[in-house]
Image (cartoon, rainbow, N blue to C red):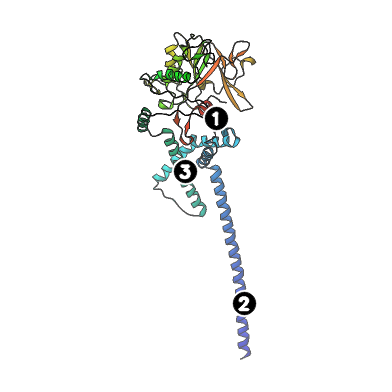
Amino acid sequence: MSERLVMAMLLSFGARKELSVDAARQELHDSAKRGERKKSDGILAIGRLRRLLTGNLYLLGIISLFWLIMRSGRKPSRLSYPCQQAALANTSLLFGGGVAALTARVAGAAGAGTSWSFGSAASRLTRVTHAAAILILAILLASVLLGGLGNGPGLTLEMKAAAASLELPELRSSNPNASDIYVAENIPAASERGVDALIDIMSHNGLDFFKSAGYSQAAGPGGIIAPDDIVLIKVNGEWRYRGGTNTDVVKGLVNAIVHHPDGFSGEVVIVENGQWDSYMDNRSDNLNPSSCNAEDRSQSFNDVALMFADRHRVSVYDWTAIQTQAVGEYSQGDGRDGYVYVPEIELGYPKFTTIYGTRISLRYGEWTGSDYDNDGVKLINVPVLKDHGWAGVTCCVKHFMGVQDL
């Protein structure tokens, strides 16, 4: 092999070697740039996701609503926790403005032919999150509406038919702490007379409704209502129709009280504290002229009070009107109506003056001007026995929770 050929081969090998090194360097450089771009895209996607979760009103509201249902659905007392208060505020924002914005967004997408552009991973994530948010919101709203509205008139007719043939056997418990439950059956056509039947059943089983020095039908020294008592009848006046307390039952209860065997010189006040609405029908902002739970749909709680007010002190007081007014007790020199806050339990109770001038503290009793008379104030809880969605049947305990506020 000639010297010139050997030299050419060596030059060629050196050139290829130099070219390979340059190519490798270029590949490493390109690879680093691709890595930086991927890292940058990842950081950008994470940033967009963070902004989406923290700045998206309706998504934040949906997550908060779900959290409220899961944490406080079966234990409403948890709503006082700071985390639940924050979630409640976010949910309020959702229904206050987020739904409108979401509706406009969906409508805009539909009007534009629903042209979804799936570009980068972040964009796809954003679109998928929006779609999931819409779906979750629709499911939650459907659950709330279906759970709140029930199954309509068909179910009501079925319930009436079942109640007509319902027979409850007498059951006894060996537990000394068991509650006594009395059931009135064979109610007459005038349904308010069902209260009289219930009082008789209670008396036959050892519990007199009327407190009296002597003994008579359903009356005795160990009875509940004295002839000079102040009786508060707590009703559910927050809902209309069958969601509220039956006013026929309230009429029968008031009628029984004012016809005390020893005469009645006390006072009866029908009370309620609505959380959202009130239909007590004694103020211009809580009227209910034709949607009452009664045989006569126009018979409101205030109508019942007026039936007896000509001969007895019977009235309606709607605590809903004073639930946000923080006041002190009568003994502290504060004569205003409102709610007295108790820091230890982070709740409040009402104190108020009836239309007859009687000053009542739910905690301490009647204010006489210098002291409280607690023994003379009685509260009768008259809830609605109804299905309450996920919570099942709710009765006396949940109903009394509505008394508290602040």
Q: Is residue 301 visible?
A: no
Answer with the quarter of the image where residue 19 lies.
bottom right
**Total numbered badges shown on the rendered structure:** 3
**In this view, the mark in front (1 or 3):** 1
Q: In percent of the image, x 55 and y 38: which residue is there?
A: 71
For marks 2 and 3, the one nearer the N-term is 2
Q: Nearer the viewer, residue 46 or 377?
A: 377
Q: Are marks 1 and 3 in contact (CB under 8 Å)?
A: no
Where residue 192 appears, as percent x and y from the top left, is: 40, 18
**In this view, the mark in front (2 or 3):** 3
Q: Is residue 385 left or right of residue 6?
A: left
Disc 3, SS:
helix
Where residue 318 appears, as percent x and y from the top left, is: 50, 19
The three-letter code of the residue at mark 1 reads Asn
What residue is shown with label 1? 175
Q: Is residue 404 left or right of residue 137?
A: right
What residue is shown with label 3? 136
What residue is shown with label 2? 17
Q: Badge 2, how many Cα within 10 Å: few under 14, some, many 20+?
A: few
Q: Nearer the viewer, residue 241 or 101?
A: 241
Q: Nearer the viewer, residue 162 or 212?
A: 212
The three-letter code of the residue at mark 2 reads Lys
Q: Is residue 110 above or below residue 152?
A: below
For marks 1 and 3, the one nearer the N-term is 3
Disc 1, SS:
loop
Q: Are marks 2 and 1 in contact (CB under 8 Å)?
A: no
